[in-house]
Image: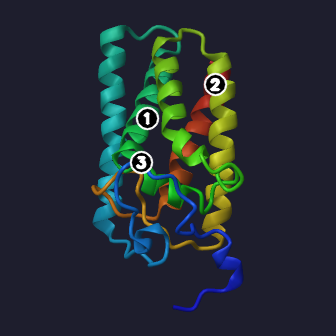
């Protein structure tokens, strides 16, 4: 395989990971093979997003539709769902995430911390009635992650999506860009509601 020197600086190395008690993911899953993007994978991704919306409507209906309740519930379910997918294979996610995230490239454990931060944000949105501080934190978190994914998309990366585990096979950068852009916009909107 032909890899230019500019491509190798973002690729995880064998010793650039933290063992969590299971095998090291195969390097072909860590960004060295171009995934075949099939339309059914996009349909699966759309089903996940639709499921998040429907579940959020159900939760808000049970809790009451006052104020910004639906927005908070939607963001909470969104963060918790995508965090859950990342926990399926946390080490592989962290390795691939580090190939494009601007913070994870500088701070190695950041990729491992991302799902925990998303769980924290999700729980915070569930319990908060006036979440302006949480919205600011979410803007900072998703804005930084979205920026890294956008830069990587411009370079046309070749990393599989580990975010939804084995259920969906799409480039992690595309999923991350959609995920973080959606949460950035929702958090910004929630600041003014």
In space, the residues marked 2 and 3 are separated at their CA atoms by: 32 Å
Residue 182 sits above or below residue 25 on the image: above
**Rounded to the nearest whole Å, what is the CA distance between mark 1 and mark 2?**
14 Å
Please say whether residue 98 is visible from this viewpoint. Answer: yes
Task: Depth check: give the residue in front, 178 or 70.
Answer: 178
N-terminal of the pair, mark 2 or mark 3, is 3
Residue behind mark 1 = 78
| Quadrant in which residue 193 is drawn | top right
Mark 3, secondary structure of its residue: loop
Identify the residue at image location x=64%, y=77%: 8
* Nearest to the observer: residue 149 or residue 46: 149
Q: Are marks 1 and 2 in contact (CB under 8 Å)?
A: no
Q: Residues within 10 Å of mark 1 (few under 14, many from 20)?
A: many
Label 2: how many residues lie within 10 Å, few (<14), some (14-19) or many (20+)?
many
Frontmost of labels 2 and 3 is 3
Which callout, 1 or 2, points at the residue further toward the start of the chain? 1
Q: Residue 88 — which label?
A: none
> Is 94 above or below relative to 32?
above
Marks 1 and 3, Cα distance to the nearest angstrom?
26 Å
For label 2, the residue is 135
Q: Position of residue 101 (x, y in %)?
A: 64, 54
From this view, report whether residue 68 is shown above or below residue 101: above
Q: Is residue 122 left or right of residue 100?
A: left
Give the number of the mark in front: 1 or 3: 3
Question: How are the residues colored?
Answer: rainbow
Can residue 192 be seen here? no
Q: At which x and y percent is residue 118?
A: 51, 33
Residue occupied by mark 3: 20
């Amino acid at each position: 395989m032909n890899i230019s020197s500019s491509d190798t600086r973002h690729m995880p190395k064998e010793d650039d990971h933290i063992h969590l008690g299971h095998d090291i993911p195969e390097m072909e899953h860590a960004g060295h093979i171009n995934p075949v993007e099939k339309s059914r994978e996009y349909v699966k991704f759309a089903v996940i997003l639709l499921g998040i919306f429907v579940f959020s409507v159900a939760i808000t209906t049970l809790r009451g539709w006052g104020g910004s309740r639906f927005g908070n519930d939607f963001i909470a379910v969104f963060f918790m769902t995508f965090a859950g997918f990342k926990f399926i294979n946390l080490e592989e996610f962290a390795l691939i995430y580090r190939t494009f995230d601007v913070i994870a490239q500088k701070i190695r454990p950041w990729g491992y911390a991302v799902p925990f931060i998303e769980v924290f944000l999700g729980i915070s949105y569930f319990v908060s009635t006036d979440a302006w501080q949480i919205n600011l934190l979410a803007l900072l978190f998703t804005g930084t992650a979205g920026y890294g994914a956008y830069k990587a998309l411009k370079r046309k990366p070749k990393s599989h999506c580990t975010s939804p585990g084995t259920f969906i096979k799409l480039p992690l950068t595309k999923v991350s860009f959609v995920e973080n852009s959606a949460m950035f916009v929702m958090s910004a909107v929630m600041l003014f509601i």
